[in-house]
Image (cartoon, grey):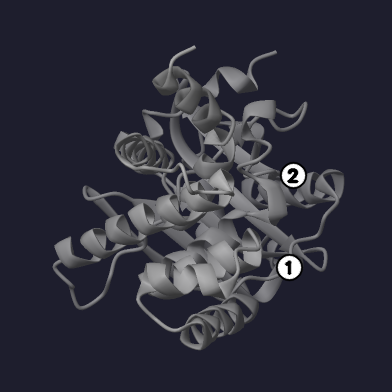
Amino acid sequence: MDDNEFLARRFEAHRTHLRAVAYRMLGSLSEADDAVQETWFKLHRSDTSEVENLGGWLTTVVGRVCLDMLRSRSSRREDPLEEPVRLPDPIISGAAGVDPEHEVLLADSVGPALLVVLEALTPAERLAFVLHDLFGVPFAEIAPVVGRTPAAARQLASRARRRVRGAAPAPDPDVVKQREVVDAFLAAARDGDFDGLVALLDPDIVVRSDGGTLRPGGLVRGAAAVAGGAIFAARFAEVSRPALVNGAAGVVATTDGQPVSVMAFTISGGRIASIDILNDPERLGRLDLTVLDG
């Protein structure tokens, strides 16, 4: 085995972990794959003979790559008066459970609500929070990545942590009970049962929709507004297929076998605290729905 093959094998042993880091940083599966590939290029060009902990070294490198990608993403924005909602890529699984390939991606309860909140953080806050709170990277190793002192990196993570706790409701862990709430919501919407819908919704529920560039999404807040919108939308509902969306109860709506929306529910305290709806045709077209068959 030559040196390149040996290095490639060592890298492959860390690929799944690196993809999980990048997914949390970027909220995009395709961009996460790009970040992992760039990390491989950097490894291949670097002298790591003195590196004692290759996994730790790779984690900080992929973090730096993702930080650059987030900053580039921010600089390309035109900063409209009202920033459109951008939802993370959903990870779709069948009712039988999460695909083994996605188990690491969904560890640490990385549901849609958390990923949406991470989108609102600054790139440096997001990196400090993800690397430290989700992957246990010491602040001394995070500091040079963000160009701060360890104390300043700690403050970034602390600020991010407060925002996450305030905006991302803790989901109920029982997926079976989640499904019961979601099914009741869908039934009440089809029946036009306004009071029944309101009873299932948290008073401060937030619904976020992302239709991409052609169908700009937005926010709807409050149980009454959400209930009214759900009854209206149910008139045009297509075939709804139960699914796990980022490990939680969700729904994939299809027409002629093609996805038209993915709804991710966050159930907290037995009520629906948030719904994230992806109906961007371009991103939906990249989804693999074969996991819902059988």
On the image, numbered disc 2 is attached to which residue? 183
The picture places residue 69, in percent across and down from the top left corner, at 29, 55
Which quadrant of the figure has residue 63?
bottom left
Q: Is residue 40 above or below residue 67?
A: above
Residue extending furthest front? Answer: 50
Q: Is residue 8 above or below residue 161?
A: above
The picture places residue 147, in percent across and down from the top left corner, at 35, 76
Q: Is residue 42 above or below residue 241?
A: below
- Residue placed most toward the observer, 8 or 236: 8
User: Quick check: can you spot residue 146?
Assistant: yes
- Residue placed most toward the observer, 225 or 6: 6
- Which numbered disc, 1 or 2, marks the residue closer to the eye? 1
Q: Mark 1 belongs to which amino acid?
A: Ala
Q: Residue at x 41, y 52 (%)?
A: 61
Q: Residue at x 49, y 80 (%)?
A: 153
The total number of labels drawn is 2
- Residue placed most toward the observer, 240 or 141: 141
Q: Residue at x 66, y 34 (%)?
A: 243
Q: Is residue 50 left or right of residue 123?
A: right
Pick the quarter of the image with the C terminus: top right
Q: Mark 2 belongs to which amino acid?
A: Asp
Q: Secondary structure at mark 2?
A: helix
Query: Residue 88, labelled with which disc?
Result: none
- Residue placed most toward the observer, 236 or 162: 162
For label 2, count other residues whose C-alpha is less than 10 Å away and answer few (under 14), some (14-19) or many (20+).
Answer: some
Q: Earlier in the sequence, mark 1 or mark 2?
A: 1
For label 1, count other residues whose C-alpha is less than 10 Å away and answer few (under 14), some (14-19) or many (20+).
Answer: some
Q: Is residue 108 left or right of residue 230?
A: right
The picture places residue 74, in percent across and down from the top left corner, at 24, 66
Query: Marks 1/2: CA distance?
Result: 20 Å
User: Quick check: can you spot residue 121?
Assistant: no
Query: Residue 170, labelled with which disc?
Result: 1
